[in-house]
Amino acid sequence: MLQAIFLFILAGLAEIGGGYLVWLWLREARPLWYGIVGGLILVLYGIIPTLQKFPSFGRVYAAYGGVFIILAVLWGWGVDKKIPDSYDWLGAAICIAGVSVMLWAPRH
C-alpha cells in the first residue's frame, strides 16, 4: 500500500510540476527550456503509473485522479499561495475516500 501511495504522489508531482513549467513557458513568457523540461517531466508522468501493481489501467488512472486533486490543492496553497477553503478540503477528503474505495475495497 505504501508503494502505491508513493507512486501516486510521484506521478502527481510529475504531472503538476511538468504542467506548471509548460504554463510558465507559454503563459508567463519564460524561456523555452522551461517548456522542454516540463514536457520531459510530463513524459515521466506517463511512465510512473505503469509501475503500479494494480492490474486495471482504468482503475489506476481513476484513483490517481483523486490523488491529483489533493496534490493540486496543496500545490496551489504552497506554490501559488492560494489558501484552500473548507470546500476545497471537503472535496479533497471526498476524493481520497473515493480513491480508497476504488483501490482497496474487497473484490471477489
Image (cartoon, rainbow, N blue to C red):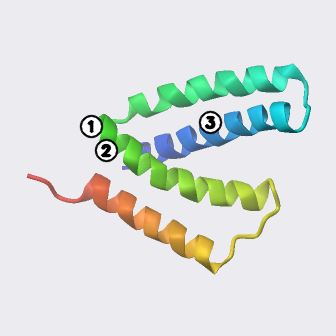
Q: Secondary structure at mark 1?
A: loop
What residue appears at the point 30 percent right and 61 percent down from the top-left corner? 101
Q: Residues within 10 Å of mark 2 (few under 14, many from 20)?
A: some
Q: Quadrant of residue 89?
A: bottom right
Q: Position of residue 63 (x, y in %)?
A: 39, 50
Q: Is residue 94 left or right of residue 108?
A: right
Q: Secondary structure at mark 3?
A: helix
Q: Which mark is residue 37?
A: none
Q: Secondary structure at mark 2?
A: helix
Check if mark 2's residue and mark 1's residue have beta carbons within 8 Å. Answer: yes
Residue at which label 1 appears:
56
Q: Is residue 88 left or right of residue 67?
A: right
The amino acid type, in three-letter code, at marker 1 is Ser
Check if mark 3's residue and mark 2's residue have beta carbons within 8 Å. Answer: no
The amino acid type, in three-letter code, at marker 2 is Arg
Q: Position of residue 49 (x, y in %)?
A: 44, 34
Q: Position of residue 42 (x, y in %)?
A: 62, 28
Q: Residue furthest bottom?
A: 86
The amino acid type, in three-letter code, at marker 3 is Ala
In the image, which is nearer the foreground, mark 3 or mark 2? 2
Q: Which mark is residue 14?
A: 3
Q: Residue furthest front?
A: 27
Mark found first going from the N terminus, 3 or 2: 3
Mark found first going from the N terminus, 3 or 1: 3
Q: Which mark is residue 59?
A: 2
What residue appears at the point 50 percent right and 53 percent down from the top-left corner? 67
Q: Is residue 76 visible?
A: yes
Q: Is residue 57 left or right of residue 47?
A: left
What residue appears at the point 89 percent right and 38 percent down from the top-left corner? 28
